[in-house]
Image: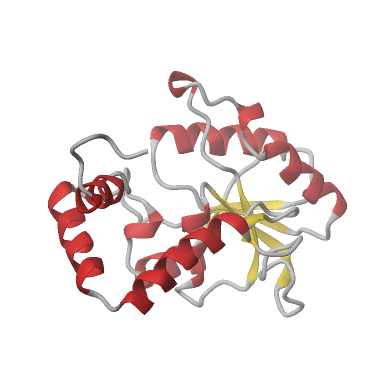
Amino acid sequence: MRELGISVLDELIAHLARLPGIGFKTAQRLAIFILKSPDEYAQQLAQAILDVKLKTHLCKRCFNVAEDEYCRICSDPKRDVHKICVVEDIVDVMAIEETHTYNGLYHVLGGVISPLAGVNPEDLNIRPLLERVKNEPIEEIILALNPSTEAETTIIYLTRLLRDTNVQISRLASGVPMGSHLEYLDGATIGMAIQARQKIDKE
């Protein structure tokens, strides 16, 4: 319910301003754009927002966004089933896919290990990853985590868990700055980092 004295335009601005990366001024511009747009566009936008909430869920296999039981990548018979690229979030899958340099599968952890933030290994999709390694013909795990101290902790943890498997573990090559996020890097940088990925010693 809208607060007393708050106009519908102010309410729209307030909701838009809650979106990540959207400040108050940008929210104002977006709200005015929607206000001035044809009714048909506003209805399509509203329907698209409802559809993404009501018709999508996490892929049963890799935890990417999906409309069916499995996402479009897991359902694609042309993908290389011998490689899994492990990422933090769904947006990282999108960033890598835009480079058109990787044709394997993915696994979305849902974050990285961060005890200070209350995120422990059991809070992430790590056990399903181990099950995939056990049950699928995986030959290589590519750890494509956003460069950070927490990501390094997660890489070390995953490497230890996979130590006794026959799977090769690799990570993105240097060139991805520490503290950066894949979603904000250009496609060329991500593509080169994947192609020049480095093997990780499991010892």
User: Which residue is painted at 81% across and 44% down in the image?
Assistant: 131
User: Which residue is painted at 45% across and 74% down in the image?
Assistant: 99
Q: Is residue 29 toward the left or the right of residue 52 in the image?
A: left
Residue reaching furthest right? 135
Q: Give the quarter of the image for residue 34.
A: bottom left
Residue 38, percent from left and from top:
29, 79
Report whether residue 60 is seen: yes
Residue 2, percent from left and from top:
31, 40
Q: Classify 14 as above or below 106.
A: above
Residue 121, percent from left and from top:
62, 28
User: Which residue is painted at 38% across and 58% down in the image?
Assistant: 183
Q: Give the quarter of the image for residue 173.
A: bottom left
Residue 63, percent from left and from top:
65, 51
Residue reaching furthest front? 4
Q: Is residue 176 toward the left or the right of residue 36 in the image?
A: right
In the rendered image, the quadrant that contains the C terminus is top right
Q: Classify 49 as above or below 4.
A: below
Protein image colouring? secondary structure
Q: Classify 93 as above or below 36.
A: above
Report whether residue 196 is seen: no
